[in-house]
Amino acid sequence: MTKWFKFEGETLSFKADLETLKRKLAETRQQINNYQEIESDLDSDAYMARGNGFCETKYSEDFIERRLGDLNHKAEQLESWITNF
């Protein structure tokens, strides 16, 4: 069975089944882990921005904080949808 979902603050909705929601939650948690790793490495001279792997520009602390907030909120919404599916 599939249902329609829409993340708070986003304009597009998507159709998903329970397994798709679980996969999206796992991907979101991985993104959170990646940004937490970036956040812990911000002061390192060897740190390089994630993405294409060739960028020498660091993410700003504000960007990391906003992104982590957005991803944590997204994970909460996914967890709620999975629980109530």
Image: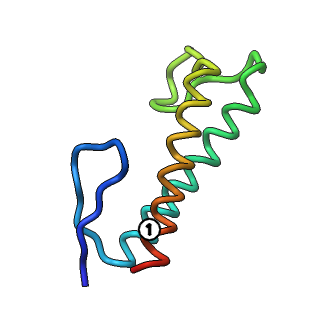
Q: Residue at x 39, y 77 (%)?
A: 19
**What type is the residue that disc 1 sits on?**
Arg
Which structural element holds mark 1? Answer: helix
Residue in the picture at 76% in, 32% down: 40
Q: Quadrant of residue 24?
A: bottom left
User: What crowding class fits label 1: few (fewer than 14 Cα within 10 Å), some (14-19), or many (20 or more)?
Assistant: few
Quadrant of the image for the N terminus? bottom left
* Side (left or right) of 10 relative to 75: left
The answer to whether 32 is drawn above or below residue 25 in the figure is above
In the rendered image, which quarter contains the C terminus? bottom left
As drawn, is 45 to the left or to the right of 19? right
- At 73% from the left and 20% from the top, the residue drawn is 46
Left or right side of 64 for 22: left
**What residue is shown with label 1?**
23
Q: Residue at x 29, y 56 (%)?
A: 6
The answer to whether 5 is drawn above or below residue 62 in the figure is below
Q: Is residue 38 above or below residue 8?
A: above
What is the tally of numbered marks visible in this picture?
1
Nearer to the camera, 13 or 20: 13
